[in-house]
Amino acid sequence: MKQLPIYQDLFKKALRIRLVEEDIISRYHTDKIQSPVHLSIGQEAVAVGICEALTPSDLLFSTYRSHAFYLAKGGSLNAMMAELYGRVDGCCKGKGGSMHLAAPEVGFVGTSAVVASSISNAVGSALAAKLLNKNQINVVVFGDGATEEGSYHESLNYAALHQIPLIFVCENNQYAVHSSLDERQSYQILAHANTYGIETHKLESGYDFVAVADYMKTLVASVKKRPRPVFIEIHTCRYKEHVGPGEDFSGGYRTEQAVDEWKSKDPLVIDNETISLFKEALLAEIEDSVNFAENSPLPTQQHLLEDIF
């Protein structure tokens, strides 16, 4: 796999996301970042694999753990860093923070801090694309915890009933905050989605960005050929705590051994040769984005009155 051009291309994109988040960790204690952060470290392959299958005109909706999807879809790193710093040059003019990133110019519609709320938004967007005969794929990403929300079930039912072309992606990292699946759910996610008559798929190697990209390309082509809702569950692993830059193994809800097992297969951990090809240039880009954020003005009182609907 290392010899494939797509491997190095996706590796570079995934490594960029990880280095950005590691940089955020290194600066978080300074309080210059004016936002809580839900880090995607360990889950980057899902984002770059999905976005590899999409065009700029295809639309992506994601959760508040959004850094990886924002960057993978093509969002500006300068604008993201300024947003985390609460500056006016941020992608939401410094008023949204980490949980509300958006880059509609590249098809990253937006994110929300409310669990599962973006799913119904994606259903509406996909319905509009269908009614307007747009050659456009809509994708919504959510966590396993979102499948416990009412809007999730209403969205799947509506999409199935009206055969709305939408790819539902459950990014299953096994935990909702500090609770594991077996403590929360009496159902199997795929089996339950299938009861709505929605075609389901499963990919367990969510650390493998090439595998994710290949699977998603097949799904996208299939939905374009025969418009309908489809559902894919991708297993992944969150290395850091639910929110914040630290680790949470002392909480007792999961083991460090389980995370280490995932890391042992993670190319961004084990492939030091490819890391060395890209790391220096990526770190320079990240440093430039931090300088951009720190030199961007803070919002004024007038900014508070703008963009109000």
Image (spheres, helix red, strand yellow):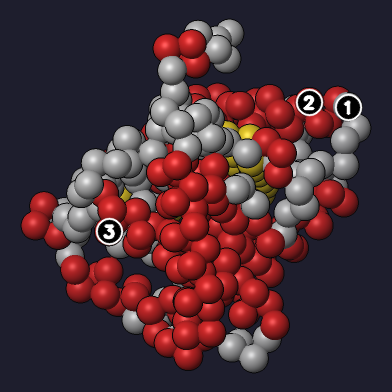
Instruction: Name the residue that disc number 1 marks.
Output: 132
Any mark on residue 26, and which?
3
Q: In terms of sequence position, does the residue under pointer 3 or pointer 1 come before the other?
A: 3
- Residues 71 and 194: in front is 71
Q: Amino acid at mark 3?
A: Ser
Q: Is residue 240 above or below residue 261?
A: above
| Front position among marks 3 and 1 | 3
**Which residue is pictured at 87% across the width and 42% down the height?**
135
| Disc 3 from disc 2: Cα separation | 42 Å
Quarter containing the N terminus? bottom right
- Residues 116 and 64: in front is 64
Would you say the residues marked 2 and 1 are in contact, meaning their CB atoms lie under 8 Å apart? yes
Q: Position of residue 248 (x, y in %)?
A: 17, 55
Query: Going by the image, does 260 lie left or right of 73?
Result: left
Q: In terms of sequence position, does the residue under pointer 3 or pointer 2 come before the other?
A: 3
SS for tag 2? helix
